[in-house]
Image (cartoon, rainbow, N blue to C red):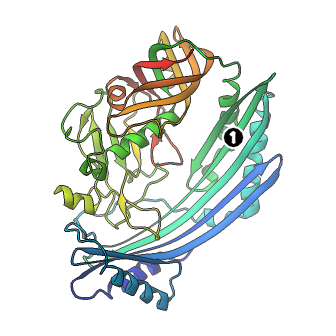
Amino acid sequence: MSNPRSLLETAERIVGWAVSGAEVEAYVAREQETEVRAYQGEVESLTSATSVGVGVRVVRDGRQGFAYAATLDETTLRDTFDEALDNSRFGSVDEYAGVAEPDGVEPVSLDLYRSDLLEFASEDKVALALELERIAVAADPRVTAVESAEYADTVYEGAVATSRGVAAQSRETGCYLVAYTLASNDDETQTGFGFSVGRSPGELMPDKAGNEAAERATRLLGATKPETCRLTVVLDPYVTAQLLGIVGATLSGDAVLKGRSLFAQRMGDAVAAESVTLVDDATDPEAFTASAIDAEGLATRRVPLISNGVLQSFLYDSYTARRAGVSSTGSAVRGGFKGTPGVGAHALRLKPGLRSQAEIVSGIDDGFLVQGVSGLHSGVNAVSGDFSAGAEGLRIRNGEIAEAIREVTIASTIQRLLLDVTEVGSDLEWLPMSAAGVSLAVADVTMSGA
C-alpha cells in the first residue's frame, strides 16, 4: 500500500478545482482484502482484491451532484469532477446540503495500522485457515464437520478534503478468523460458530475460535422445545452486539429527524436501567471498526448516547446536524468511494459491569441463556420498538446451566428490554462488526415455546 499522504494530495488537488459558488468534497480510498476458506483439509477458495477510487460531491445553489471513478489517473479525476459539477444542476434544492467544515476537534492519534499484515504471505494465511478447521474438528468427537473455516483481512487507507477546509487521512488494518461447525448425535444436528479478531495475524487465536465453535454446537445437542413462560434472559455477547446495532440505528439523527426512531422526543428521559451506559467511541483502539476520522474527514469522538439510563445524545453527520441545529458528532459513515456519506454508529459498546457471565447465571433461579437469535433485524419495528426473534440456547435453573432449548421466540419491546436490564457483564468483547458484545441480563421477557 502506498503512503496515504498521496491520497490526501489527490483529494486536495480535486478540491482545488472548485468553481465560484460551489462546495466540493473529495473522498479517496484504497483497500486491499484477502479471504481464505478451508473445507475438509483443503483450500476451498482464496480471493484477494484491491480497490482504489474517488468519490466527488459538488454542492451548488443547494443542489448536490455526485460522481465516482475506480481509478486515480489525472484525466479521469478531472472528468469525475466535471461530471459531479454537471450533476449538481439536476439535484433537488435542499437548504441543508453542503460539505463538512472544520469544527475545531482534532483527531486522536490512534495506532491502527500493522505493517506486518502486508508482509504476511498467502501460504501463511492458508495455514491459519487450515489450522482453524483442524482445531474445530478435534475439539469434540461430536463435531462431524466444519462448514467453513475462514481467514480474512483488510488493509485500508483513505483521505477526505473539502473546499471548506477539511483535510484528513487515516489508515487501518484488521483481520479475523471464524469457524462454523456442525455437531451431530444420532439424527440430530446443531450448528455453532467461533471467532477471533485482531489488527495483525499475530493477534489471532485459532484455538479460541475453533474450540468456541465446537462448544457452541455441541452444547445445543439434545435441545427441546420448552413451554411458554416469562423469565430472565441472559444475552450472549454476540447477541447483545446484534441488539446494540439495532439500538444504534434508532439513535441516528437521520432516524430521529424522519420520525422513525422510538427515541424521538425523549432526550433527557430515563430510557434504560441505571446500569446501562451506552457510548459510540471510534477512538477506542480495541474496537475492530476504530478510526480517527469519520467519512467526512471530521475527528471521531466518544459520544455518550445513554448515561446511567438517561438519553444524552443522538448521532449526527454534518447534514443531519445542520437540519437539527446542532453540531456533528463525527458520525458520518459510507460504504466506500462509490457512495455519499450518511450517519451511523462507528463502535458501540456498553460500559461493562463487574461480574462474569457465569457469576450472573449463578444468581438466576429461572432463566434462559440466549446463545443465538434469528430474524432479529426483520423482527424489530424501529418506530414502536416491538421485537420478536427466534432463539436458541440453554435453560438456567437454580443458578446453573441446564438443558438446551430451541425453536422458541423471545418477544418484548426495545424500550421495555432496556428498562428491565438487571446486570451488564464484565466480559466485553470486540467483534468483527461496529458493536462490542457483553453478557446482558434482562428480567421478565416472554419466551414462547410449546
Residue 273 place in picture, x, y as percent:
30, 26
Residue lying at the far right of the rendered structure: 41
Q: In the displayed structure, would residue 139 be above or below residue 36? A: above
- Residue that mark 1 sits on: 180
Q: Is residue 314 left or right of residue 393?
A: left
Q: In the displayed structure, would residue 145 be above or below residue 394? A: below
Residue 25 place in picture, x, y as percent:
33, 76
Badge 1 crowding class, 10 Å Cα cut-off, few under 14, some 14 to 19, many 20 or more, is many
> Which quarter of the rendering shows the N terminus?
bottom right
**Element class at badge 1:** strand
| Residue 52 seen in this snapshot | yes
The residue closer to the viewer here, 206 or 231, is 231
Q: In the displayed structure, would residue 9 be above or below residue 345? A: below
Quarter of the rendering containing residue 316: bottom left
Residue 70 place in picture, x, y as percent:
53, 77
> Which residue is pictured at 64% across the width and 68% down the height?
49
Q: In the displayed structure, would residue 363 be above or below residue 171? A: above
> Which quarter of the rendering shows the C terminus?
top right
